Amino acid sequence: MPRPSPTPPSDPTRPGLDWVRAQAFLQTERDRYTHDNPGSAALAEQARQHLLFGVPLHWMNDWGTPFALHVEHASGAVVTDVDGHTRVDFCLGDTGAMFGHSPAPVAAALQRQATRGFTTMLATADAAAVGAALSERFGLPFWQFAMSATDANRYIVRWIRAATGRRKLLVFNGCYHGTIEDVFVDLIDGQPVQRDSLLGQVHDLLEHTVVVEFNDLPALAAALQGGDVACVLAEPALTNIGMVLPDPGFWSAAQGLIRQHGALLVLDETHTISTGPGGYTRAHGLQPDALVLGKPVGGGVPCAVYGMSAALAERATRAKQEAPPGHSGIGTTLTGNMLAMAAMRAALEEVMTPGSYAHMLDLASQLAHGLRGVIAQHRLPWCVTQVGARTEFQFTPEPPRNGTQAGALLDAELEHLIHLGLLNRGVMITPFHNMMLVCPATTGAHVDQLLVALDEVLDLMCA
């Protein structure tokens, strides 16, 4: 998913780095990538003839490579490109394949369902099983489906506005909730500003969207004081601007404030599902009124879910019953299609298991420990943050506490340099900042390969 593109730091030397040497390294790595990937180069040229920006989705150009890498196949924790190179994948579709590429139970479920129909706009036994599994896992009794977490966020906000009669949405600065337009509001020098990069938006988002800093309880209380906020839509920990963890006690106090002022809490666990089988919500005892989960819940198949408390479901049902007849605008024809239901059932019952998480969390801890060692060896003033199976290093000695602090640390030029160096050494990490995921198929040898590659890259860049 797209990240903000801040201006690189004004100091071209970057603390601990030899920037002249790093620029020479970048040119060498670009030349190496071009030489080693002629098949991708040819396909990129072919794609430019008919695909806007030369790729199926313009975010695919964010890797910082001279041209788009083209994949032949992906399995488990490994991606093989059209030139026959295999790479250990710590990006994992930027969470879409968080449980590995083509997990066997999901692949088998899709094969079975492929001969039984793709979509009918009718219910199936799989749908009932998925609803029960979600309720048991996350503690919310009622669920609906979407094709992406973006849509799931859009739908739950619509339901809550209808149920409460309130119009305003509150988000945290630097949040990520897909491309739901309402959240594209930032704090600039303490003032809310509609994001300039939001293309084609014609309505003023500031009329109905309130933004405050993460971990700022006084600001949250002040924003809720007016009694006009329908819901707070939040990641349990920020993951898009660079990872930002909640302060101790933040969520306990925040939930109290939200309820005190009659608003509802929606937790978007699309990224923080890396924490454990029940996400950050269950691991830390949070009690949201609604929860959203996208990408990984179907093993990489396009689908998403959103759940509601019994009280919210009752209010939402009443709002629908009292509305004039006609299309609600909530949902799409392919929502809850048979393929997605089969994939989700297999993922929830056989892939997203406690055993899988135990393996992933242990490896992620090993990775975080190893990253700290490599960074310390090169005397770089960087920190490492972990949220379950998700790990990230950031260009600061101390982890940021809010979106403004995290955004100021982003350095797209330095990130792309590191990422390209890793890519050429058989390792992929997420192209947006420095995020890494491990999956059930990731091994200790894979982690070691990443650490060795990073050590080599930093050695060629440091003073």
Image: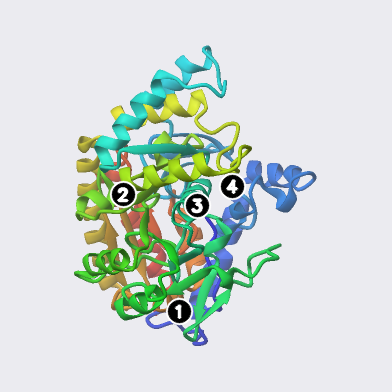
Image point (71%, 62%), residue name:
200
Q: Which one is nearer the viewer's eye here, 11 or 197?
A: 197
What amino acid type should be assigned to the residue bearing mark 3? Ala
Q: Is residue 424 visible?
A: no
Q: Is residue 123 above or below residue 1?
A: above
Viewer-nearest of discs 2 and 4:
2
Tell me the distance, in whole angstroms, between the alpha carbons under discs 2 and 4: 26 Å
At x 30%, y 30%, the residue is: 132
Residue 23, percent across and down? 54, 74
Task: From the viewer's perspective, tell me whether residue 109 is left or right of residue 48.
Answer: left
Q: Look at label 1 and name its amino acid.
A: Ala
Q: Residue at x 23, y 69 (%)?
A: 253
Q: Secondary structure at mark 3?
A: helix
Q: Residue at x 69, y 42 (%)?
A: 43
Spatial distance from mark 4 to mark 1, Cα to Cα?
A: 29 Å
Q: Is residue 238 above or below residue 7?
A: above
Numbered mark located on residue 69 in the image: 4
| Disc 3 + disc 4, Cβ < 8 Å | no
Can you identify the residue that label 2 sits on?
274
The disc, 3 or 4, on the residue closer to the chain's N-terminal end is 4
Q: What kind of element bears circle 1? A: helix
